[in-house]
Amino acid sequence: MTVQKTKKVRKSKESLLREDQEAEWRKKLDQGNKTPKAYAMDKVYLLDDRVDHQTFGVGLVVSLIPPGKINVFFQDGLKMMKCG
């Protein structure tokens, strides 16, 4: 009878960070029931608005950066975006 050892698969720090970030993103999006607005550079956004970007998907406005920029938290991380 032979005994086979099983290898434990370790997740990289980057993988764990990405999972934590995705969980945080989902939690923040679930906190409100706002319908996402289609993203456009000439629109005005408010804090906690949901944004639907054609490349990055649905995100949450987490900070306003005058003049004309916002930080949006998407599933793959924080992005600085232009706005009106």
Image (cartoon, helix red, strand yellow):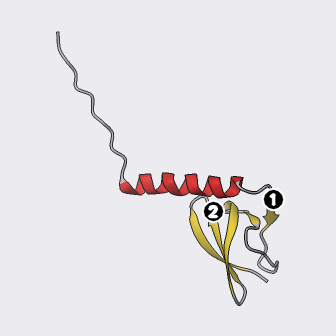
Residue at the extreme top of the image, as rendered: 1
Instruction: Say the numbered circle drawn on residue 71.
Output: none
Where residue 52 appears, as percent x and y from the top left, is 75, 62
Disc 2 from disc 1: Cα separation: 15 Å
Marks 2 and 1 close (CB-CB < 8 Å): no
Q: Left or right of 71: which side holds 50? A: right
* Total numbered badges shown on the rendered structure: 2
Where residue 56 appears, as percent x and y from the top left, is 65, 62
As displayed, is residue 63 above or below residue 12? below
* Residue at image point 63% right, 62% down: 74
Mark 2, mark 1: which one is toward the viewer?
Answer: 1
Where residue 36 appears, as percent x and y from the top left, is 79, 61
As displayed, is residue 26 above or below residue 53? above
- How crowded pointer 2 is (Cα within 10 Å; few <14, some 14-19, many 20+) is rated as many
Where residue 46 appears, as percent x and y from the top left, is 77, 75
**Quarter placement of the N terminus:** top left
Identify the residue position indicated by label 1 in the image. Answer: 34
Identify the residue position indicated by label 2 in the image. Answer: 74
* SS label for mark 2: strand
**Quarter placement of the C terminus:** bottom right
Q: Which quarter of the figure has residue 6?
A: top left
Task: Pick whichever of labels 2 and 1 is earlier in the sequence.
Answer: 1
Q: What's the residue type where badge 2 is placed? A: Phe
* Residue at image point 82% right, 58% down: 35
Residue at the extreme bottom of the image, as rendered: 67
Residue at the extreme left of the image, as rendered: 1
Q: Which quarter of the figure has residue 40?
A: bottom right
